[in-house]
Image (spheres, helix red, strand yellow):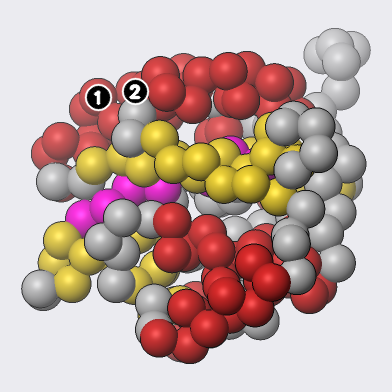
Amino acid sequence: MSAADVSIATPSAGRALRKARGSRLPYLIETAADLEDARQAWAELEPAGSAFQTRAWLDAWFAWIGPVIGARPVFLIVRERASRRPVVVLPLCLRRRWGVTIARFPDFGVSDYNAPLCAPDFAPSDAELEALWAELRLAVPGADLFVFEKVPETLYGRPSPFARLGWLAPMELNCWTLALPASRA
């Protein structure tokens, strides 16, 4: 892991949040403590996702792996301010290690990649994305550090907006987006 894969919650994040709120970001953020609370938003966005972004995958991960390693779930739901339509579901888990609460994707070696579930038309500007990230990381209760690994730049030919965050080094491999033929023939 390089330093580019880590974001630390700092006082400057609070300044960025105040600046973002002053500009009236076109998004609202909700925090949910379990997948069931994120069910409605998830159902709307899941068809645009992949196997590692399905409720079935995450239900199993949080039922079997999370408890063994002491990880608890937190889901961030981003909605368009005007329509209240969900545009992002960011599944994370919190784990206390070395006196620090670390927020990361539910992975720990069992997912091929990690990415938020995004609506196909979610395309924030760079400034909106940075302001949204400042607000998102403050919405995660008690997180001191964010560690994101195996984040793809694209998923099924669509850019992953969060791969553009300045502190993140996107994953260079892209074998998870290999399109298989419709039939064996």
Give SS at disc 2: helix
Give SS at disc 1: helix
Viewer-closest of 142 and 48: 142
Residue 160, given in percent of the width and then of the height, sits at 75, 55
Residue 174, given in percent of the width and then of the height, sits at 71, 55
Say which mark, if any, is on residue 170: none
Residue sitting at 26 percent across and 61 percent down? 142
Residue sitting at 44 percent across and 42 percent down? 31
Task: Indicate whether residue 114 is drawn in magenta.
Answer: no
Residue 65, given in percent of the width and then of the height, sits at 23, 35
Q: Are marks 1 and 2 in contact (CB under 8 Å)?
A: yes
Q: Is residue 174 above or below residue 120?
A: below
Inspect this view and state whether residue 25 appears: yes
Residue sitting at 59 percent across and 66 percent down? 133
Inspect this view and state whether residue 177 appears: no
- Where the N terminus falls, by quadrant? bottom left
Magenta-colored span: 88-95
| Residue under label 2 | 60
Q: Is residue 185 above or below residue 58?
A: above
Residue 96, given in percent of the width and then of the height, sits at 15, 61
| Residue under label 1 | 63
Q: Quadrant of residue 161?
A: bottom right
Count of numbered circles on the image: 2
Residue type of the residue flagged with mark 1: Ala
